[in-house]
Structure formats: C-alpha cells, structure tokens
Amino acid sequence: MVEVIQASNLALYELEERFNLVQVQDYDFFPEWQGIAQDLTAYEQHWLNQAKADFLSLAEYPLYEEIVKIAVLAPVLLIAGLCRALIVPAAKKQVKVSFEDEDKVIRGREEWY
C-alpha cells in the first residue's frame, strides 16, 4: 500500500534529505526572471538579499506562517513602502472566550469572510 504523507507535516530539510535536493544559487537558472531586479535601488536589493538569506537560514527548520511574516514579509513590505498611510495595515483581532464554570480560556483570531 502507498504511504501518503501530508505536505504540511514535512519540513524543507526533510524534503532535501529524502529527494537529494540542492539549492541552486545560479541567477541564470530561471532565464525568464532576468532583468526584474534592474529597477531596484542598491538599498532595496540589499534588503531583498537580506530577507532571502534570513528565509533560507530559517528554512532549515520547521517554519510557521508567523515566523515567515516576521522574518521575510515585514521587511519586504517596509521596503516597498506598504506600511505608510494611505495604506494602513490591518490584523485579525484576537478573541478570547472564557467559561464561568470552568478554568478554561479559548484564544483565537476572528475570521474575515
């Protein structure tokens, strides 16, 4: 019988080990991406390289969405100027439910639909 493994239960380092994957650093690997970075300033390129290095360093371990947001997405949004007014970032409101008869608290975030 075929073993089915949920992708969400695997870390990148496990895939690299299982399938003998190696990271390619050659910029010519995807020729269709050539020329994209030409419009970036040296400052922007520096911070994108830093975000990439941070992500690749973290990718050796199990990654969670919040870690990626902090390490990669936040710096990229900052450099892109997407955290300034007229664009106002928003986050899901934290919700806490407690029960009078029990010593239990349920915490979560409100869903947007």
Image: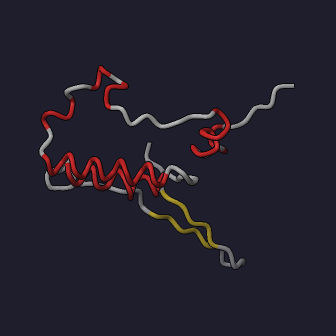
Residue at left offset 35%, top offset 24%: 30
- What percent of the width, then of the height, locates residue 84? 16, 56
Extreme residue in the top direction = 32
**50 vs 36: above or below:** below
Q: Is residue 25 left or right of residue 64?
A: left
**112 vs 22: above or below:** below
* Observer-nearest of 96 and 22: 22
Residue at left offset 12%, top offset 44%: 41
Residue at left offset 57%, top offset 43%: 12
Residue at left offset 64%, top offset 41%: 17
- What percent of the width, then of the height, locates residue 65? 48, 51
Classify the position of the C terminus by image quarter: top left
Q: How is the image coloured?
A: secondary structure
- What percent of the width, then of the height, locates residue 6? 68, 37
**51 vs 19: above or below:** below
- What percent of the width, then of the height, locates residue 66? 46, 56
Q: Is residue 18 left or right of residue 59?
A: right
